Amino acid sequence: MTTATATVTDGQAEQVRDAIAALFGVDPAYGPTLMEEGWDDVTGRVIVWEGDPYAWPQYVPYGGTDWESGHEFSPIKLPDGVRIEAINHYSIAVYPA
């Protein structure tokens, strides 16, 4: 159960960002970007990436197949104590679990 004081640490958010970058084979310095806490009025941490494949948040964390390319993506393991939620086709929010 999430408490009102629960937060996602920088380290947890960075682990999620790095796992997303690894999933899609990109360098975190040029791929998914971890935004500052409170970015765009989202209460959790936000990871933004306008990269390929389109609508990548649907593959995180469960994996799946990109219907356009046929490429299969493996699931990623989230750090303990966090959950994610797609915001749109190019960003996710990272919340306390």
Image (spheres, grey):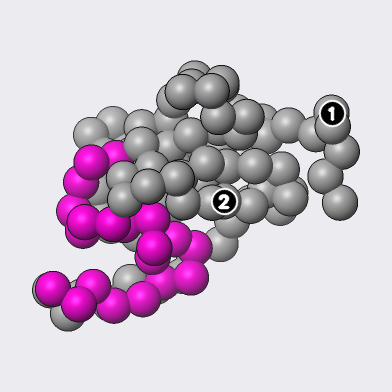
Q: What's the magenta region?
A: 49-68
Magenta stretch, main secondary structure, is: loop
Tell me which residue sits at (43%, 30%) in the image.
Answer: 34
Identify the element where label 2 is drawn.
Answer: strand
Of the numbered discs 2 and 1, the one sitting upstream in the chain is 1
89 and 45: which is toward the camera = 89
Q: CA distance from mark 2 to mark 1?
A: 18 Å
Residue 73 placement, left or right of 76: left
Q: Is residue 53 magenta?
A: yes
Q: In the rendered view, tell whether residue 32 sits above or below residue 36.
A: below
Q: In the rendered view, tell whether residue 96 sits above or below residue 70.
A: above
31 and 58: which is toward the camera = 58
Find residue 25 and name its label.
none
> Which residue matches tag 2?
84
Neighbourhood count class around disc 1 (C-alpha, 10 Å): few under 14, some 14–19, many 20 upward? few
Q: Position of residue 60 (x, y in %)?
A: 44, 61
Tell me which residue sits at (59%, 56%) in the image.
Answer: 78
Which amino acid, mark 2?
Ile
Which amino acid, mark 1?
Thr
The reply to whether residue 22 is in sight is no
> Which residue matches tag 1?
5
Using the rendered view, name the quadrant where residue 44 is placed.
Answer: top right
Q: Position of residue 30 (x, y in %)?
A: 23, 34
